[in-house]
Image (cartoon, helix red, strand yellow):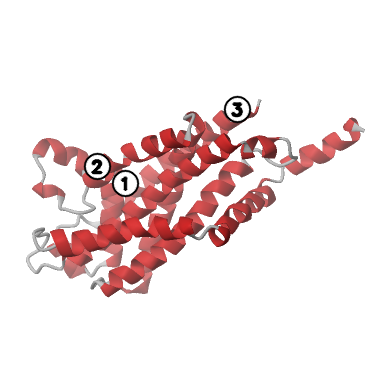
Amino acid sequence: MTDLLEPAIDARRGNLLADSWLMTTRLLKQIVRVPDLLVFSTIQPIMFVLLFRYVFGGAIVVGPHGGYVQYLMPGIFVQTLLFNGAATGIGMADDLQKGLVDRFRSMPIARSALLVGRSISDLIRALLVFAIMLIVGVLTGFRFGDGWGGAIGGTLLMFGFAFAFSWIGIMIGLVVKTVEAAQSAGFIWLFPLTFASSAFVRTDTMPSWLRGFADHNPVTVVVNSVRRLYLSPTNSREFGVPALGSQLLQALLWLAGVLLVFVPLSVRRFRRMSR
């Protein structure tokens, strides 16, 4: 009987797309059943917008004609999506700690589908958070300045970057032993990347020893690319944003590099755990 079932099990394990979608829908149902997850994941970025816009915005000068909200919102968007990647690792660690992954291992599904489903579902949740953030940004004065083509292109770049960095979160969730450790390890490396970048201030205001890191920081090149795509050419020049070509190339190289490194590492780590 086992010999008869093994071909069917192997075939089922090879159906990565179907199994990944099954895992994705399972996780998306949590948004409906536990709406607190979505609510609390939007509170922090909204607080960042209001804090930087109305508390620090008057003291931060990024251009000769002000307009800090135009400079701020692309940085807030990227930061929020990166923090969502840390939440991916926390969710992965939570599934492991609760034993849910052990149950799925015993089922005839593709092993990698657990990881792919986790990354895609969190990306869809991030899309909902982004929509709320965009509404808050518009209410506080943010406007797209370079047409719908630039707005769509910048958004796709951000979500591609968020998807790539979610695999770093998955790797962290697979390595650590507890949810608490995943939370600490998932955020501790993001803070220097986001704050030592052009997300909130211009890098030419930083000390020379820090500016070298900030200018080549993956967050900086993505935020600068999004600003070039989101804002008008006049705003981009006033804010000192570098030309799109060099920044976009670096952003795409970072995106591809992260995927090429962390997707195989995560899959290999998970398979070793399964064995």
Residue 215 visible? yes
Label 2 sits on what residue type? His
Q: Quadrant of the N terminus?
A: top right
Label 1 sits on what residue type? Gln
Q: Which one is in front in this view, the residue at disc 3 or the one at disc 2?
A: 3
Q: Quadrant of the C terminus?
A: top right
Most foreground residue, 41 or 172? 41
Q: Which one is in front in this view, the residue at disc 1 or the one at disc 2?
A: 2
Q: Which one is in front in this view, the residue at disc 1 or the one at disc 3?
A: 3
How many residues crowd around disc 3 within 10 Å: few (fewer than 14), some, or many (20 or more)? few
Residue 261 visible? no
Residue at 24% from the left image edge and 53% from the top image edge: 199
Dot 3 or dot 2: first in sequence order is 2
Residue at 48% from the left image edge and 36% from the top image edge: 173
Q: Is residue 101 above or below residue 175?
A: below
Dot 1 or dot 3: first in sequence order is 1
* Residue bearing mark 3: 273
* Residue bearing mark 2: 216
Residue at 58% from the left image edge and 48% from the top image edge: 117
* Residue bearing mark 1: 250
How many residues crowd around disc 1 within 10 Å: few (fewer than 14), some, or many (20 or more)? some
Most foreground residue, 108 or 267? 108
Percent across and percent down for residue 196 are 21, 43
Dot 1 or dot 2: first in sequence order is 2
Percent across and percent down for residue 75 are 27, 56
Q: Are marks 1 and 2 in contact (CB under 8 Å)?
A: yes
- Using the numbered discs, state the Cα–Cα distance from disc 1 to disc 2 in whole angstroms: 8 Å
Q: Are marks 1 and 3 in contact (CB under 8 Å)?
A: no
Percent across and percent down for residue 172 are 45, 34
Q: Secondary structure at mark 2?
A: helix
